[in-house]
Image (spheres, grey):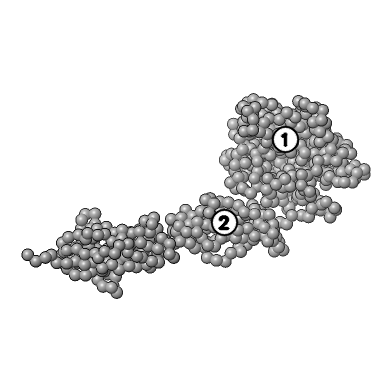
Amino acid sequence: MSALFGRRLRRGATTTAVAAAAIAALSASQAPGAIPSAAGGAQAAADANPPAESSATGNSPYYTELPPLTTPDKPGASVDLPAIGTGPAEAGIPASVLAAYKQAEQALAETKPGCNLPWQLLAAIGKVESGQARGGRVDANGTTLSPILGPVLNGIGFANISDTDGGAYDGDSTHDRAVGPMQFIPSTWATWGQDANGDGRKDPNNIYDAALAAGEYLCHADRDLSVDADLRQAILSYNRSQEYLNTVLTWFEYYNKGTHEVPDGTGVLPAGTGPVDPGPSPTPTPTPPPSSKPGPKPSKPGDPSTEPSPPGSGGPEEPSTPGGGGSTPPSTGEPGTPAPKPVVKRIEKTGTGTHTAMAGSEFTERASVRAVDAAGKPVEDVTVRFEIVGDTDARFTSGTSVLTRTTGEDGTATAPAVQAGDQTGEFTIRASVDVKNVAGVEYTASVTARQADGLTGTGDKELTAESGTEFADQVSVKATYKGAVAPGVAATATMITSADGSAPRTDGPYFKDADGNPLRELKDLETDANGVLQLPKIYADDTAGTFLLRIETEGGATLTVELKVTAPPSA
């Protein structure tokens, strides 16, 4: 949407230099849809009046008033931080609107953690698009009390976008109009609309739905909004105007330094006429004359000022641009024009090993994927989400079950190792990217029971007892696995009939069950944290002789212990 200048540029200017900078920022901004160019004269004039059919924004209006020069303090940085309901009026955001922005930030932090969307960016866009839903004039569910509509996009001063929704959202069955507090055109809403308030409807007039949809839109194309170039591309994809970018960034910086909550309906509207239901026959907005002063340059060399975008008319290419956006011509190869960023078409597994580990140990294999484009070439800087899914207590060595990694020059991203817990069984390691129509991949992993490959006795005394008495010493053994102690290993202890047999005896030494009855086989035993297993007391019956006790562990470690029972001395 193009700019409608308000009655003022800034209020509260404290120095001539700063005020001059604010005026320069506005005068340096070009016409909507214009791409900053080193060329002047005729080129600047042509950029100032782009044909309606090629406009990326439809020339719809938005608020251009800038925040006051005296900004609130950043939270935690000053004792002067305004309390709730106090501070500069422009810093106040209506309660429901602020809640919607923060809810969208939290939702995207979970579903698209690599995007790093800050709610302050949604607030900045909401400010210039609708004055925070006309100062927060919303009902208890977050729906605007009356529609917020942009002008009719009929080609008269704006882009010519024929109706795509049968007038369902904008009330116009001939042409489209931008709708709601975040000013989506119907064709864009059809792709990006969300139901964030759980009422079963995707309503562009609801601030919760619209805020989440705006966040999803800004995050698409695998953007990381903590990166300056991606942040600028995202804003320009929303409304393709350098002036729009400058205005949103100014409010974004302002809100980052602090804000406060105000009651719904009491927010301060920007000065001037904005996109608030301008009526069925709006007067075309005059295009501001081009400025001879260059606009602000990106903070990084080569930062793009525009990003290819499909038409806002809802054609086969997506996404369309909020606010009545059209299409942006592809790069012409002129100096300073960055090459298009490769687009991920699929991700594929790069690891071929088996993901198996013993309980309590670390997996040796790691989940790894490669992102490639349509030609099969690797794509760099793609955020890959790795997630452990299933009934398991296994976690990445970072201690989490979900994390992200970025692909390198070879297009590969590798997850950290997985630490198996105590729970055995299978689970899934899933890798996915936040790119439409790109399927994720899955690795099947399994945790096996703890094992021991060695058993040794901890004592050297001969185990003897007279018939009818108990053994003075208890049997104690230590389990190891590959030379290390083996804690938590399952074991059994059985009084066997012979060295080459495994069946329990029916006479001779025995353990006792809970009721004191003889028991010659113990199951469900487990070594302690030091790999030690101490058996309960053993008793001798009236049978004298040498008997064998066999101890076995999960993993196949065995140890056979001799038990001697002597007859009582003769009278």
Which of discs 2 and 1 lies nearer the camera? The answer is 2
Viewer-nearest residue: 380 or 188: 380
Q: Estimate the spatial distance between the alpha carbons at disc 2 and disc 1, rounded to whole Å.
A: 39 Å
Q: Of all residues shown, which one is farthest toward the bottom?
A: 500
Task: Give me the residue at 69% from left, 57% from top.
Answer: 380
The C terminus is located in which quarter?
Answer: bottom left
**Disc 2: which residue:** 416
The residue under label 1 is which amino acid type? Answer: Trp
Q: Is residue 524 visible?
A: no
- Give x and y (percent) for residue 13: 78, 27
| Mark sitting on residue 251 | 1
Task: Give me the residue at 64% from left, 45% from top.
Answer: 116
Horizontal relation, residue 548 to residue 129: left or right: left
Task: Give me the residue at 50% from left, 59% from top.
Answer: 362
- Using the image, determine if residue 492 lies above or below residue 202: below
Viewer-nearest residue: 36 or 17: 17
- Give x and y (percent) for residue 192: 67, 46
Q: Of all residues shown, which one is farthest toward the right?
A: 42
- Give x and y (percent) for residue 25: 81, 36
- Give x and y (percent) for residue 270: 74, 29
For numbered disc 1, what is the local secondary structure? helix
